Every structure is written in structure tokens, then in C-alpha cells.
Image (cartoon, helix red, strand yellow):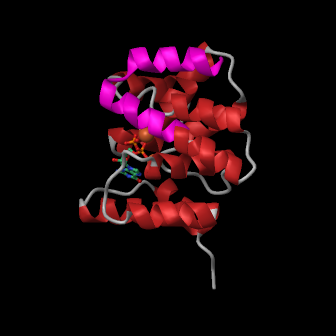
Amino acid sequence: MTYEEAQSLIEATLPEKRYIHTLGVVETADRLARLYGADVEAARLAAMLHDYAKYLDADMMRQVVVEENLDPSLLAFDDELLHAPVGAILLDRAYDLDPAVVSAIKNHTTGEPGMSRLDQILFVADAIEPNRSYPGVDVLRDLADRSLEAAVVATLRQTIAYLLNKSVRIFPLTIETYNHFVKTP
Ligand code: DGI
Ligand code: FE
Ligand code: FE
Ligand code: FE
């Protein structure tokens, strides 16, 4: 799938606000890929596609989890977690995609211990793209220019703190990713 094909698909699939977010993620992932020596074309394609499944019906996504033997514990957590792994598998099924791109889409919400540099770039770009505005986002943006791994940890810290404040359950993979990337003194 070319970037142009992905852009047409996403522009036709997502509401305008989410499409604008997506364009911000593309711009940021492109910049981070250049900065950290990752495949720029793969980063742009993964960013364009990352929220493809964001507005699919939750029951339909749960069905995909079962049919495709995705982690069944996903079914016991917030539906928000489904769009990353389900989007990755649906796109992989329908288009000829680089496995590195599929992996970045799959891991963009929770991260994954030992995730690739491309995965890390999409994970951080999603959190800091120019249309994001939450307390502390500028600190994260500065950090992302200095250390990709430090930005991964800081993004996870901000996500986990946000979830704690909302009193919602935290998916174990999110914690496992944090534990993997946090530097032990
Ligand atoms: O799709 P986006 O809004 O661009 O961003 P995202 O895919 O990174 O996150 C989507 C949502 O998922 C966000 O509201 C936070 C939530 N989330 C991330 N990790 C966890 C989580 N929700 C729960 N319940 N548990 C998690 O571990
Ligand atoms: Fe997302
Ligand atoms: Fe994210
Ligand atoms: Fe996103």
C-alpha cells in the first residue's frame, strides 16, 4: 500500500478532527524518523494508518479479537484498547503492508516491551503531535527531541497518571512496557 492510497482510505474513513490529528502524527513521525535514523516512509505510512479502526463498532472489534486469536484479556478492558491491534490486523488482512508498519500500528496505544524504534516513534508521535494539548505536552515535546526512549517512558508516565486520575483499570501491557523502558538506577 502506498502512502497516497493510505491517505485516501483514511481521509474517507475518519471524521475531520481525527484526520487532522492523523496528519499531525504523520508530520511528527516523519520528523522523529529523520532525527533517530528510522525508515521515514514506513513511519509516515504507519502514522497515516494508526487510528484506522478508532470508530469501528466495539462488538465488531471484539469479534475480530476472538476470530484472529488476539490477546483475549483485551476483551476484559476498555474498548479504547481495541482499535490498535484490531486496526493492525484488519489492514494487514486487506493490504500488502510491511510487517514493521503493522507492528507500529498494533503497539501504538499500550506500547510493548522491547518494541522497535519505529514502534517507539509512532507511540511518541501520537502523544506529542501539534494538535495535542494537555498539561505537560511541551515537556514531552522537548524530551522527544533529545531522547526517544526517555520520551517513551515519559509518554507512558503521562498515560498511566491520566488513567489513575480517571480511576479506570490499566492494561498490564501498558505497565509492562513502562517497566521495560524505565531505566533502573
Ligand atoms: O487513539 P488516540 O486517542 O490518538 O490515542 P491512543 O491510541 O494512544 O489512546 C487511546 C486511549 O486509550 C486513550 O484515551 C488512553 C487509553 N489507554 C491507553 N492505555 C490504556 C488506556 N486505557 C485503559 N483503560 N488502559 C490502558 O492501559
Ligand atoms: Fe489510537
Ligand atoms: Fe498513543
Ligand atoms: Fe492517534
**Whether residue 147 is situated above or below residue 60 in the rendered picture:** below
> Residue sitting at 58 percent across and 14 percent down?
5
> Residue 148, how many percent across, how many down?
62, 60
**Whether residue 86 is situated above or below residue 9 in the rendered picture:** below
- Residue 182 part of the magenta segment: no
Q: Main secondary structure of the magenta part?
A: helix
In the displayed image of the protein, which residue is found farthest to the bottom? 185
> Residue 44, how many percent across, how many down?
61, 34
Quadrant in the rendering for residue 89: top right
Horizontal placement of 14 versus 90: left or right?
left
> Residue sitting at 56 percent across and 19 percent down?
6
In the displayed image of the protein, which residue is found farthest to the left? 166
> Residue sitting at 56 percent across and 59 percent down?
177
- Residue 22 part of the magenta segment: yes
> Residue sitting at 74 percent across and 39 percent down?
39
> Residue 123, how many percent across, how many down?
54, 49
Q: Which quadrant is home to the C terminus?
A: bottom right
Residue 68 seen: no
Q: Nearer the viewer, residue 22 or 181?
A: 22
**Whether residue 75 is situated above or below residue 152 in the rendered picture:** above
Residue 42 seen: yes
> Residue 1, how many percent across, how many down?
65, 17
Horizontal placement of 44 versus 141: left or right?
right
Magenta residues span 1-26
